[in-house]
Image (cartoon, rainbow, N blue to C red):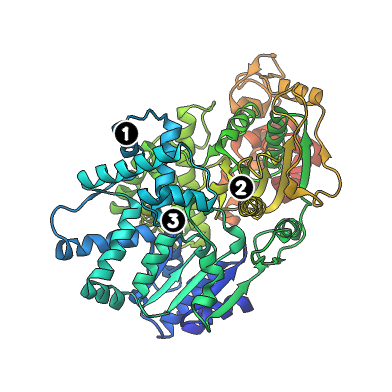
Amino acid sequence: MMAEAVLEGLDPDQRAVAEAVRGPVCVLAGAGTGKTRAITHRIAYAALSGVVAPQRVLAVTFTTRAAGELRARLRQLGVPGVQARTFHAAALRQLTYFWPRVIGGEPPKIIESKIGLVADAARACRLSLGRTELRDVASEIEWSKVTQRRPEDYAAAIATSGRRPPADIVDVARVYAMYEQLRRERNLLDFEGMLELTAAVLTEHREVAGQVREQYRHFVVDEFQDVNPLQKLLLDTWLGDRDDLCVVGDPNQTIYSFTGASASHLLDFTRDHPGATVVELVRDYRSTPQVVRLANGVIGQAKGGHPLHLVAQRPDGPEPVFTQYDDEVAEADDTARRARKLIDEGVPAREIAILYRINAQSEAYEAALAAAGVPYVLRGAERFFERPEVREAVVRLRGAARAGADAETDGTGLILTVRHVLSGAGFSDRPPEGAGAARARWESLAALAQLAEDMAADDPRAGLPEFVAELEERAAAQHAPPLEGVTLASLHAAKGLEWDAVFLAGLTDGMLPIVYAETPAQLEEERRLLYVGITRARVHLGLSWSLSRSPGDSRRRRPSRFLDGLTGGAATPAPPRAERTRRRAAKGPQPCRVCGRPLTAAVERKLGRCEDCPSELNEDLLVALKEWRAKVSEEQRIPAYVVFTDATLQAIAEHAPGSLEELARIPGVGKVKLDRYGETVLGLCGA
């Protein structure tokens, strides 16, 4: 790929970033403005034009998933040699390499979690701490270490920071001191210690610093608003007296101050680097104008900061819907109903998310979605690539690739090959009934099958070896494919993600802002958290709150103060409770229209009868529908079941609908398919 070709398709601001090939450069990138596209094209343009050597570039991110995405995009742009790592991964790599030379002896063992060591430290201090208290104290120790506070400094740091300690200040300081003592005695190293020790090695050993700085001459740091003091120390150590640095971030998405992160490093960049090039990215390609307008309204009320006013680039969409409920049960029930409606209209379940302030809020939505028959995925649960069925599937796919089991020609061949291999692991076109282990296993395999379809759509020439390589890259980066279910996640966990439809739930004062946000800085961070939630939505956005916790409680709550003046005066009234009760009752077993027996199997519910009951099937119509489906499948290069499943075609052939309204009542015919195929199907029925 030629250097100039890399610049094609970039908007003027993204192009300005790409062409600023030498640092210092500061990119202020609003939500949905294509920051990853801008910085990857900047690296590619600099490398392909000969300004930098790819192997001399270190791109630093905050998650292995983001690092994997950077590497993948750079490979597509013809620059595969760039190192993209998290701060911790880069530090560990350097520390491991130089350890025998500058320190020697047995290297320390890296601890993944502090909880166990904190528990031992608490016992040594004769303190009894529960699981939640241990977790909170571990977080407090982490904050102290990233902000460079020692145990003896902890009490003074709390007094000046306005931070609320999870336990008695003296007790936390004692546990912190004992934690450090036990860690040294057991030759253990936590993540913060890893960064600190790497910086110390570079500072104290000039020859090591020279070797690292010779290797990495150009730096790119993503999400710079989330850098904490310890990470900034390591970055400065890597740089030395050079300034070939490009930082990218959005001050409006600073939501991790409680971990020690500070947007000051981003906002003060030009003070630290006079003469730096500053580019603002404000063209929002993710969200509709209606969503962008609300996001601007929320962040526009912020006190201080550096608000980036987003400019929507997408066509108009529906207005955000504000809904007030009597209680949390009603809110969860109706949110599940609205998610079900979107799915019926053709929005994939994996493109819908319900976001809340704290994880404890998920329980009501899990129950409501299960009652509504809507599959869901809890973000932050077990790692996808560590699931037994996924490990087995990857082994099978790897073996098939080595055996040359790949199809010959196009993307359809890849899809069929992957589905065939997965069938050996238990995958089928029809999901199992219920929501137990069998369903979870099927959904994992279905996510792999969907990933193959996505890859084939992006590159019809891709084969099984390329697919296996993609899986291995994703596994290393813990970049899981989207599972087929509505995502349930906290607002913090949702950062960096996006969906077609987002429901922001529980937006009451005391929850957002959270009750313990008291200082002006803490309240503004809560506002930014709402802004992050809003900007996750591409098209559909719902915002809701309830006036009480449980049915019958007094209605004392009020909507979040961050919504003042933005709801258009009044919220959409929720459906009456009686109506919701009837709707839920209707979710019981559907009776067979022939014998009246309750229908439990999905295919039977779709047909409206038991499979062995007499049917009024029009055989000629079914044949015509299948021939039409095969033609569409071939023309669009998609599996036949993606057009309509066999069960849906059989239901159409039995009912022979005469209008779009009648066709829409058949399960499996959502709005998207009705718009795309409805008239043709009706024509076949009429013939």
Locate residue 597: give its quadrant. top right
Query: On the rendered structure, is 206 left or right of 15?
Result: left
**Front position among marks 1 and 3:** 1
Q: Which residue is mark 2?
A: 351
The front one of 137 and 405 is: 137
Task: Name the element at disc 2.
Answer: helix
**Front position among marks 2 and 1:** 1
| Mark 3 Cα shell of 10 Å, populated few (<14), some (14-19), many (≥20) | some
Q: Which residue is mark 1?
A: 125
Locate residue 115: give its quadrant. top left
Let me know if residue 680 appears in the view.
no
What amino acid does circle 3 point to?
A: Thr
N-term mark: 3 or 2:
3
Q: Which residue is mark 3?
A: 63
N-term mark: 2 or 1:
1
What amino acid does circle 2 point to?
A: Glu
Query: On the rendered structure, is 608 left or right of 437?
Result: right
Q: Position of residue 595 (x, y in %)?
A: 69, 14
What amino acid does circle 1 point to?
A: Cys
